[in-house]
Image: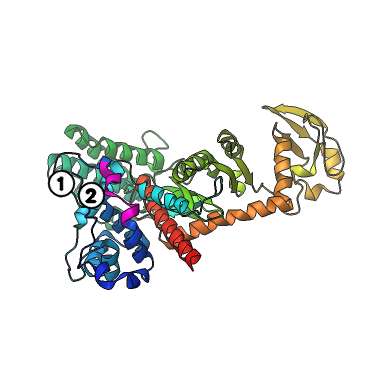
Amino acid sequence: MLGERDPQRRLFSAGTQLGPTVVARMGFYGKLATEGPQRFQDADFAGAYCADNGRPSVAPSMLVMARLLQHYEGISDAEVIERCRYDLRWKVALDLDLASVEAPFAKSTFQAFRVRLTVHRQEGLAFEKSVKAARDAGLLPPRLRVALDSSPVRGRGAVKDTFNLLSDAIVAVVRAVAQTQETPPAVVARQAGLARHVEAPSIKGTEGVDWDNAQAVGVFLDRLLEDSERAVALAERAGCATEEVALLRKVIAQDVERPTPDGPPTLRQGVAPDRTVSVHDPEMRHGHKSNGKSYTGHKAHIAVEVTSGVIAAVEVTAPAEADGAQVQSLVAQAEQTSGRPVEHAVGDTAYSTRTALAQASEAKVDLVTKMPSPRQGRHGPGAFQVSKDGKTAQCPAGMASAELKHRGNGYLHVWSSEHCGACALKLACTRAARRTLLVLPDFHERRRRERYAHSEEGRGLLRQRMAAEHGLGRLKNLGAGAARYVGRAKTRAQWLWTAAVANLSLVWRKQAAMAT
């Protein structure tokens, strides 16, 4: 049942004993002490609790503020309890007794509250209230202009090679069966002939295999596949572990193949699409940063209001998800959290795709982006003269195309190899024998966008993209660059809580600046 916090401050609480002057000097902790109880009400979380049954819970408003402090400091659940017991700033922020060293709640209660919010889809409530705080403070204009950007998030799960990945998947099946049977996993593993997977910290590190001998590696892999079949049979007899079995089968399908039906198994060459890289967090994927460096985890997307720097929307997807595919969801979330319409959006080249522009048009938002540029010293599509209907085209040397072909809903212009071979501009145009140019229905619209992006007005608008980069910087400084939890939903919740901290810090800092 929902527990409620006493609205009256206690005589011996830390804030009362220290006085308002000292509390005001405590920065984020002091502002949370004075404004947190009004901003975060217990009734806001009533939907996550039973209305008329059970004993009263710890006041959710206190747990919310404790979670904000946790993400502000980037500490573990156990350290949260220690801070509540011994840290003066936490005692002030949470209105705890100054002289008491008793924690106001247990670690299990704090963790259960996180699960409760996830189950009832209220992880974003604190974030929404942080955006509302910015609106109440007058920091948001009547119509928003948002900057869009994305950032890699390193995953929490352990990334392993195929051999250890298979072993981990087998262990996951064994543990699921053991939990159903209420039997220790080691006992279940021994009975199924799978003890080496449960008892060994690393199956690859404990087996005496000559890794330079392909035949020995094949034998070892074949034994792993036999163990996998035992694990599947074990789960089928117990009638459980269906998700774990599906994961095991996926790992086998993506990483193992048999060149011949009767031959030994081998590792699959290349990387399978949407490859699972961790049993501990099956939603993690390989990704690439803009500089080409690879990472493993997730990708976070944000929308930042450019005049105030307030983070108005947060999404977390797989690394392979295109940035442009998130435009509509980010705009819709920004409008929902702020209560204001989004009129303009700005982004980098990743948001210049046709998908992004179509989503912006659907959301009735003017999207201004950088456009893809040709390689330095090369002639891009903008250097060609193309008729309005797209049926005629001249290259930078003034030569008309020699052939015109239909390609989907557009035209493909082809220049002759004789003219291209003798052209003085060839090295700046193409390395192929002849130049081609695909003209789609939006060809002229994209050229218009290119010209606008290079105009003085366009460059001024695109400089506002820095608001999103600064927003990502604030979130990473608070630890959001690495996932604290396993799974994409929990990682998104982490970013929402971190964004709430970043927004509240920004609002309170600007309010203090305006008051001086």
Q: Earlier in the sequence, mark 1 or mark 2?
A: 2
In percent of width and height, residue 370 lies at 65, 49
How many residues crowd mark 2 within 10 Å: few (<14), some (14–19), many (20+)? few
Seen in the picture, residue 151 relative to 50 is either above or below; the reply is below
For this view, does 436 lie left or right of residue 352?
Answer: right
How many residues crowd mark 1 within 10 Å: few (<14), some (14–19), many (20+)? some
Front one among 435 and 47:
47
Residue 188's image quarter? top left
Q: Is residue 463 visible?
A: yes
In percent of width and height, residue 510 lies at 48, 62
Disc ID at residue 190: 1
In percent of width and height, residue 468 lies at 54, 54
Residue in the image at 56% along x and 54% along y: 307
Q: Is residue 45 magenta?
A: yes
Residue 283's image quarter? top left
Q: Which residue is mark 2?
A: 112
Residue in the image at 18% along x and 32% along y: 237
Residue in the image at 33% along x and 44% along y: 122
Of the 4 image quadrants, the one containing the N terminus is top left
Kindly identify the amino acid type of the residue bearing the numbered disc 1: Arg
Kindly identify the amino acid type of the residue bearing the numbered disc 2: Ala
Front one among 313 and 280:
313
Disc ID at residue 296: none
Q: Is residue 279 magenta?
A: no
- Tell me the SS state at disc 1: helix
Q: Which residues are magenta?
A: 37-46
Looking at the rendered image, the disc whose residue lies closer to the viewer, 1 or 2, is: 2
For this view, does 399 lie left or right of residue 456?
Answer: right
Q: Is residue 214 visible?
A: no
Marks 1/2: CA–CA distance? 33 Å
Residue in the image at 40% along x and 40% along y: 254
